[in-house]
Image: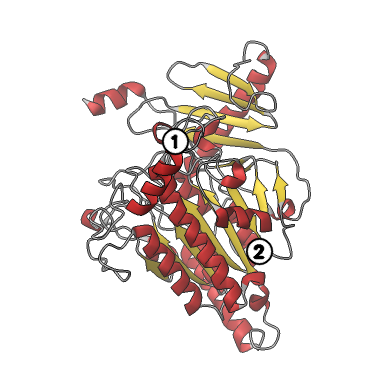
Amino acid sequence: MIGRRDFLKISGSALAACSMGGVLEAFPFFRKKPNVIFILTDDLGWTELGCYGNKFNETPNIDKLASQGMLFSDAYAAAPVCSPTRASLMTGQYPARVGINDYLQPETGWHLPEDIVSLADIFKGAGYVTGMTGKWHLSGYVNQKVKYGPEGYGFDEVLISEKTGIAQGSYFYPYEKVDRNIKPVLGENEYLTDRLNYESIKFIERHKKHPFFFFKSHYSPHWVLRGKDEDVRYFEEKLKNGTYYDKANPELAAMLKVVDEGVGMIMDKLETLGISDRTVIVFASDNGGDEPLTSILPLRGGKSTLYEGGIRVPLIVKWPGTVQPGSECKTPTITPDFYATFSGITGANTIHSQHLDGVSIVPLLKGQTVDKRALYWHYAPQSGENPCGAIRLGHWKLMEFFETQEVELYDLANDIEESKNVANQYPEKVRELRDLLSEWRKDTGAVIPDRQSAINKDE
């Protein structure tokens, strides 16, 4: 297997050879490659956007993005919490294979493996400028003396990323729970999401003439919810004067409003610079919504569960010239698919041999059909509470609860709410899916946690 150092060495040599041979000057292959902007939100539920049917939150720019691209109805996060999904995005592997099966605690000694060929490495090796702003949550913080942050995994520029924590209510300057050293540029009462929006535009302006990959990783709308006062008041009045579904949350709506404004700023800037037609924009979430804070309906469960509410997420992809505007894809996809997709787009899959669990979704983006495949989940929270595995194959979804050995089987084609456990009615399907899940755990090295060990640790 080609490790990270060898991959970067090989790809660097290839770039040098192309440059010396005049390829970059004459009809540069790299200039044909699209810029990629990946916008990842934190804890944004499947039904939080207007284009997914929300009647309370206001997301006109994200809705516009969907009208210009493809909306995915059955997109899944690789985990029901943030760190495993982010690890999956960066590696193209299931979290179980990476060994990150829960969010990383501040004091953790574990982090994303240093020898992994990261998603940023893929772009960097293909001649892209790489940058990110916002949440990382794949290693410890400065006070834990970690060896690497995102800059150690292929990002040329790292902007407003955490040094001491992951926001959790620290959404206004000074950012005590993100990085105390960040100085405001938008005024003393600077709002964190506004700052991320600002830095995103500056990055695009700096690199408009060169292929770039930009990872815009929001801290919002992660709990503790805190929006700008004027926006919160607006949505509080809206709630008073209208009838909306249960748990409409003015604070969350206010936070999402600024995320949406950032999407609009990016789209406008790309148009102004004349590079919109060669820029891919992806909008997604790292896991489902936080059920106590918002409505997950019609889905069951929420963040930290493997029910649909915890893992089914919004996904929008705009790719001018490839994706038909206003299209919808109902084929299930999952987080590690992005790594395989971008490996193919950049050509990097020809020079690295890292195991990939995801598959390229380019055929789907072109409106083509693909073979049916199984998607897998393994959730092993450090608290030891409710460890669970799941598999979806076609319209069938099976969940296996490790502590009780109980299984639940759902027909998602007729029961997206997961209200009817039909395991007793389809024993052969249960056996088939449970066997596939068991074999997958063996392949990835997923370990079923020892409940008693977790209890002893807590005590």
User: Disc 2 and disc 1: Cα gap in Å?
Assistant: 37 Å
Disc 2: which residue:
345
Q: Quadrant of the N terminus?
A: bottom right
Is 59 located above or below residue 160 in the figure? above
Q: Position of residue 456 (x, y in %)?
A: 25, 24
Q: Position of residue 144 (x, y in %)?
A: 23, 53
Q: Earlier in the sequence, mark 2 or mark 1?
A: 1
Tag 2, which secondary structure? helix
Residue shown at the point (35%, 60%) measured from the top left: 161
Tag 1, which secondary structure? loop
For badge 1, the amino acid type reads Thr
Q: Position of residue 382 (x, y in %)?
A: 34, 33
Q: Nearer the viewer, residue 169 or 371?
A: 169
For badge 2, the amino acid type reads Ile
Q: Residue furthest front?
A: 241
Q: Quadrant of the C terminus?
A: top left
Q: Nearer the viewer, residue 179 or 233?
A: 233
Disc 1: which residue:
294
